[in-house]
Amino acid sequence: MWTCIAALLLQVALGGRAEGASPSALTEYTAADFSDELHSGKTLFIYFQQLVSSTISLFLVELDQSADALQHYGVLVGKVNCNKEPFHGYCAEEKAINTVFLFRGGKEFLGFSLDTVFDVNSIVSEVLFAILREEIKYVHTETDLLAMEKAARGKKDIALCYVSSLGTQEHRSMMETAYVYGSKYQFILITGGPVLNHLGVDETSRSSQVWFLHCSAHSRSMTSEHCPSTRMGKPLSTLSLHTFLQLMEAPLVSEVYEDPSSVRPPQYPYQDTPQVFLFSRPATKREDLDKATALAWRLRGLALLLLVHRQSPAVKTPEEYNAAYKLPEKGSEVKYLHSNSPDELLELFSNPVDEEEEEEEEDDEEEEAALDMLDDEIAESVFENRLNLPDADSLAQLTSDNFHDTVAQSSLTVALFYLPWNAVSKAVLSSFSDVAERLEGSEVQMSVVNCAEWTDLCAAESGSSPPIPFQPITAFPTVLLLRPKESAQRYGGMLGTEALHRFITLSQPPSPVLLSTQEEVTSFLLEGPPPGSAGYRPDRALGLFETLSDAGARQFAEAAKSLRGEVLTGLLTDDLAEKWAAEHGVGLPATLVLPSWAKHTRPPALPASASAQELLSHISTALLHPVPELTVENLPSFLALGKGLLLLFVGEEEDEIGHTQNHALLEEMREVVELGGDWMARYLVCWLHLGRTPAGMSVLGSYLGSMPPLPALVLTHLPSGSEVYQYSPNTPILASSVLQWLQRVEDGTESAAGKLGEDSWPPTAELFDFLKIMDMQDPDLSRQRASEAKAEEGGDSFPARDKYPHTEL
C-alpha cells in the first residue's frame, strides 16, 4: 500500500500529467451545478468572481494551475462567474471580491483572503493545512513539544518541520507529505518561537528544516525526556522529505556474512544512500553490535550501516581494516580504512552536509542583505551600475553657469533632467547614453542636468538673465528639446533607446519645411526612415497655401510645431501649391495627409479648420490606421481618444495557413469599419498580436477572467461604463455579424462577460494601509485629508492619459 501512496506522492511532486489528460481541472460552475456539488458533500475550493482586474486575473491563473494538484487530494477547484449568473449569498457580498472559499460537508468551512493564497504553492499548502488542521499540530514552546512527545511515546514517530513562513514551497511540500503519511506519523509544524532555541536553530534563519523524532519504539528505555531525533540534511522538498521518511524506516543495523565488495547496492527507496561497513569478530560479537548500533543512530539519515561478520568464509577483507564505505554513485568502489574512532566515520558524511549548510547560510545572509538594500529589480540594476557614469565625451554636463551658452551654440540640445538616486532616472540614463552614441557627429548636443546639484536650474528660477526657456521640472526623469530663442519642447513618449532616438531624429528638420521646388517636394515625400530605425517610415503632412501670410498657413505652422518629432511636415506656396492642388483635385488652401501605412494611395485632403487645435485633431485622425495594431508604445495615445476599444486578439502564426487566417480576420475588421461608416466613429477598431506583444495574454485574461480560444474579439473601455463584452467564440468573425453584435450591445440585450477593475490600487493587506495608521495616530491629519478629498470632488487633477494605468490596458 505504501508503494502506491509513494507513487501518488511522487506524481504530485513532479507535477506530472498523463498524456491525453484535460488541460485544466478548474471548473466554471453555474449556480445550479455549484449547488449540486455542494450538497453532494464534496470538498470544494471556489472563487466567486465579480470584477476583472490584473490582480484577480493573475490569481485565476494560479488557481487554474493549483486545480491539477488539489484534485489528487479530493478537492474540486472552480469559480462562479457572478457577471453571468449571480449566486445568492456570495456574489452580492463585497467581501467575496477578495476572498476564496473552502466548502466541506455541504457547508462553508473557511474563507481565504487573496493576500494569503496568491500562487500555486500558497493555495495548495493553505487548503491542505485547513483540511488537516486536526491532524497537524503547531507548537511554539519547548513545553508544548515535550507534551506532544510524551503523548506519542510508544505509539507514533513524529515528523517535526520548521518553515520560515506559511504559503511557501516548503510549506506546501510538508502539507503534501503530511496528507499521505499523516496516519502513520504525527506531523508538527513550527514557524518560530522559543522552541527553535531548543532545537539549535537561530530564530532569524530562513532555511527550512525537518527532524524525525523516534518516539514509537523503546519508550521505557529512554533516559531523556525528549525522543531521540534525526535531522534531515537536505533542503526541504516533497521528494527529499519522502525519501527521508522512507530512510527512517530502514533497519538501524543490517548484519551481513559476505565481503563488502559483494554486497548489493541498496534498493529503492535507499538507492541514493551511502553504505558504511563495520567488521565484527566472533569473540566480540556483542560489543561490536552495540558499537554499530550507537554509530548507526548518529549516522541515521546520512548512511546505512551494515555489520560484517568475519566468521564467514566469504569475507576476504584483510584484518588490518576495521571499517569500509561505499558511495551511491554508479561504478563507485568500496573504500577500506582503519578507524580509531566512530567520529572519523561520522565526519566522512556529516562534514559535506555541514559545509553545504554553511554555504547555504552564507548565501541566505548575502541574499537577505541584498533584499534589505534593494527593493526591486530596477533598484538592483541601478545599485550594480552605480559607478557606471555616462560617457563624458558624448554627454555635456549642463549647469547654471553654462546652460545658456551651451544651448545657444547648437541648433538642437537634448537635455535629460535626472536625480542620481532615482531608480528610473538611472535606468533612463543608460538609454540616453546609447542614443548619444548613435548621434555622435551630428548637430545634436546630448546633455544631462543633475537636479540634485543644480536645483536653481531645474526649478527654472525667475529673475535669471536671459530667462530659462522652460517651466520648473517636477517629474524625474524629464527630457527637453532646447533650441536657441525658442521655448523648450517636452518629450512625452517612451523612454527606451529606439523611441527616443527616432523622436530626436525627426525633430531635427524644421517644422514645417518650406518647399520651393519640385525636387524638394520629391525629396520630402521619399525621405527614408531615420538612421538606425530600420522598418520605420514617418508620417507626413503637406500644407498648400497661396502665400505664407494666409491665416491657414499660420494655423498649419502652429500645428506643425506641435507635431515636431512625430510627423514630418512640409509647406508649399504660390505656383507650386496651385499645381499640387490641381493634381489632387482640391482647392487652396488645403492640407494633405500622407500616413506611413497608406502606400500607393491618393492622400486625403482635410477640411478647412477654424483653429490650429482643430487642424491638429484632423491630422491626428487622418494619420490613424483604420484598424491599427495595438502595442505598448501606442496604447496611451489610443486610450486618450476616449473611444471604446473593439479589440481583436490573434495568436502567433505558426505557418503560412495561420498567416493567411490572421490576414483574413483583419480584412473582416476593416470591412466592419467601412460598413459601419460614421456609426463606427464611436469605436476604435484595433488588433493585438500576442506573438509580438506577449503581455496581451494577461490583458485578455484580465478582461474575461480566463484565456479564451483564439482569435478573440472583445469590446472594452466604453465611455458609458466598465463592462467588457466578448463576441461569441463559436461564431465566425464576419463584418455583418460583428455589426449586429455591436448593435445588441448598444441596445442592452447582450450580457457582459466581465468588468474592468477600478483604477485605485488599495493596500494589499491591512498592515500596509499606512494612511489609515497615520490617521489613527493623528486625528487632525485625518480630518485634513478628508477635507482635501471633498474639495477635489467633481474635478480631475490628473492628465487624461493618467486615467489609464499601464497595468490596466
Image (spheres, rainbow, N blue to C red):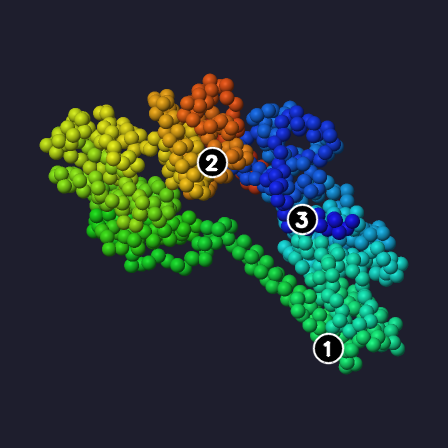
Give the class, few, some or many, for how many residues have Cα within 10 Å of label 3's Cα (few <14, many ≥20).
some
The disc labelled 2 sits on which kind of residue? Glu
- Secondary element under disc 2, as helix, strand or loop, is loop
- In the image, is residue 790 above or below residue 12? above
Q: CA distance from mark 2 to mark 3?
A: 38 Å
- Asked where in the image residue 683 lies, by quadrant, the reply is top left
Q: Earlier in the sequence, mark 3 or mark 1?
A: 3
What x and y, as percent, mark residue 809? Answer: 45, 35
Residue 337, label in figure:
1
- Residue denoted by label 3: 11
Q: Secondary structure at mark 1?
A: strand
Nearer the camera: disc 2 or disc 3: 3
Of badges 2 and 1, the one in the foreground is 1
Q: Considering only order in the chain, which callout, 3 or 2, is on the residue closer to the N terminus?
A: 3
Which residue carries the number 2 mark?
Answer: 808
* Residue 91 position within the rendered picture, expressed as x and y whole percent measured from the top left: 61, 27
Place of residue 195 in the rendered image (x, y in percent of width and height, measured from the top left) = 73, 54
Residue 24 visible, this orientation? yes
- The amino acid beneath tag 1 is Leu
